Amino acid sequence: MKWTGKKVGLALGGGGVRGLAHIGVIQILEKEGVEIDLIAGTSAGALIGGAYATGMTTREITAKVDAYLKSSEFEESAIKSMGLSFSTGPKSFFQKAQIFTRNQYYLIKALFSPSILPVEDFQSLINYLIPDVDIRATHIPFYAVSTDLITGKQVVLSEGSLRQAVLASSSVPGAVEPTRLGEWLLADGGVTSLVPVHAVRAAGADIVIAVVVDRDLPRGTDIETAKDVLYRAGEITANTLEAAELQNADVVIRPAVGDLHWADFSRSHTLIRIGEEAARESLEKIHASLPLTRRFARHFLNRAQNRGLRHTGSDPGPS
């Protein structure tokens, strides 16, 4: 897109395992010839966006995700255990008893520790998907959005270790210990920017395609305890801030991820397809947002491809 004078930026939002839908969105953008000039990611968006920015194909990223889900690291991880607790699938009496005991353990741990999940679990996932490179070495300029818990300000990481930046961006408050980086104490970027539209604009994007993979705000939730009230208030605040930021995006893609918990991997194989479907539904808006020069180029490319197909069809070649 550099020859058009305008840059297209991709803002990939946070949402834990729901972020696998980003893979499907990127697949459709590739098929449609929509070139991305820069990427900013929050949390899961940083994980998938960072992997893609290094030059990996979506097929390679999918293969790495599958390999991780079959690995001993995942099988023995607290991430899988937590995900099973929130999975909506059928559970035996023994599994329910295990989940109850585990949840009590997490509750007690939360009172005496800055996190309930070992940072090694998240680091293992990141190492599976992200090569050990400097952010400045990525094929597509990449920015990982995080939050400094000391100053309360958003921090956009654009240099240094890519793995460390992704970990800082995806350190879910309470679940994963914050990442210490210099004077910063970095936590999940979703605290200040669940979908990093502003970060993409600030990095120089003229056109922003935003992908939202956070949970739908439940309507039938029981609000009976103080914890319920606090949690609901936090959800409302996050949704309001997100809506304000999304107003600055040219295209907003919303894969139908429902209310899937961020650690529930039970539907991981369907999330990529869900992302593809959402991107296809947004294609008209995506192409309409692109510069005129790019739209003309796509039109002539399609005509050339069609002529090539007609020529191939009329010339079957030797039998």
Image (cartoon, grey):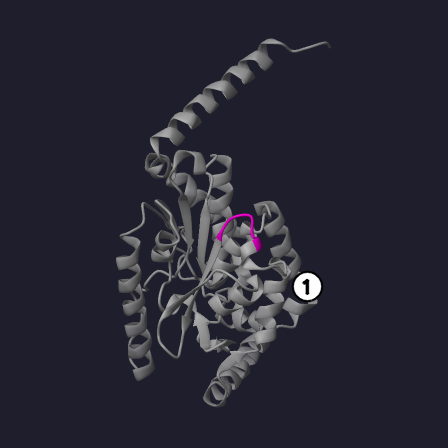
SS state under label 1: loop
Position of 234 compared to 257: left or right?
Answer: left
Q: Residue at x 54, y 58 (%)?
A: 135
Counting the numbered discs, the total is: 1
Q: Which residues are magenta?
A: 137-141
Q: Magenta region, mostly helix, strand or loop?
A: loop
Q: What is the x, y in percent for residue 139?
A: 56, 48
Q: Of 150 and 86, which appears nearest the observer? A: 150
Q: Residue at x 35, y 67 (%)?
A: 192
Does 221 appear above or below 102?
Answer: above
Q: Which residue is mark 1?
A: 71
Q: Is residue 139 magenta?
A: yes
Does 130 appear above or below 23?
Answer: below
Name which quarter of the figure residue 190 lies in.
Answer: bottom left
Can residue 170 be seen at all in this image of the molecule? Answer: no
Q: Residue at x 37, y 29 (%)?
A: 293
Q: What is the x, y in percent for residue 157?
A: 47, 63
Q: Of 131 and 80, which appears nearest the observer? A: 131
**Quarter in which the N terminus is drawn:** top left
